Amino acid sequence: MALTALKRTAEEGAKECPEAARVLHENTYVDDICISLYSREAKKWINDVDKVAEKGSFKVKEWVSNLNLGDEDTRPQQDNRPVFKCGSEQKVLGVVWEPDRDLLLYKVSAAEIRVEEVLTKRMVAE
């Protein structure tokens, strides 16, 4: 229901911020908004997405970037939550993301796997 409400909020905000509405409608999966930008335009996109989302009473917990946006772009939201974090390991769509290297990783605890021989890619795929 929350995702349906978010998509409806995006539709209602499409006139004022069409690109932000498109991001919310097309790039939201469960509780993650995933968008890749190649420039410092990220700050404008973030402000627009926040603006549209807030009209439906949605608040983004935090924004994470692998681009160092500097202190001038690190602004707290109303309740002092960080907006940009850089460098620390994050989870996105249930997978670990390392922003510094822009890598998606699977992490498995050694206690979860008992290996009696060397694993190959083919063995894991089966």
Image (cartoon, helix red, strand yellow):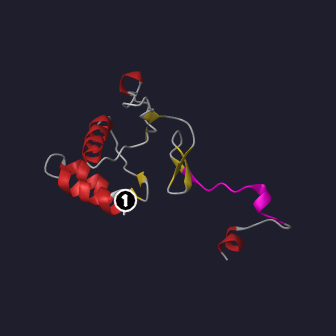
- Determine whether, in the image, residue 120 is placed left or right of residue 66: right
To which residue does mark 1 refer? 2
Outermost residue toward the right in this view: 116
The stretch of residues the image draws in magenta is 104-115
Query: Which quarter of the rendering shows the N terminus?
Result: bottom left
Image spot of residue 50 (x, y percent): 30, 41
Which sits in the foreground, 91 or 119?
A: 91
Query: Which quarter of the rendering shows the C terminus?
Result: bottom right
Outermost residue toward the top in this view: 72
Under mark 1, the amino acid is Ala
Which sits in the foreground, 70 or 1?
A: 1
- Determine whether, in the image, residue 19 is placed left or right of residue 46: left
Image spot of residue 55 (x, y percent): 25, 46
Residue at the (53%, 39%) spot, across then down = 100
Image spot of residue 67 (x, y percent): 43, 35
Residue at the (45%, 32%) spot, across then down = 82
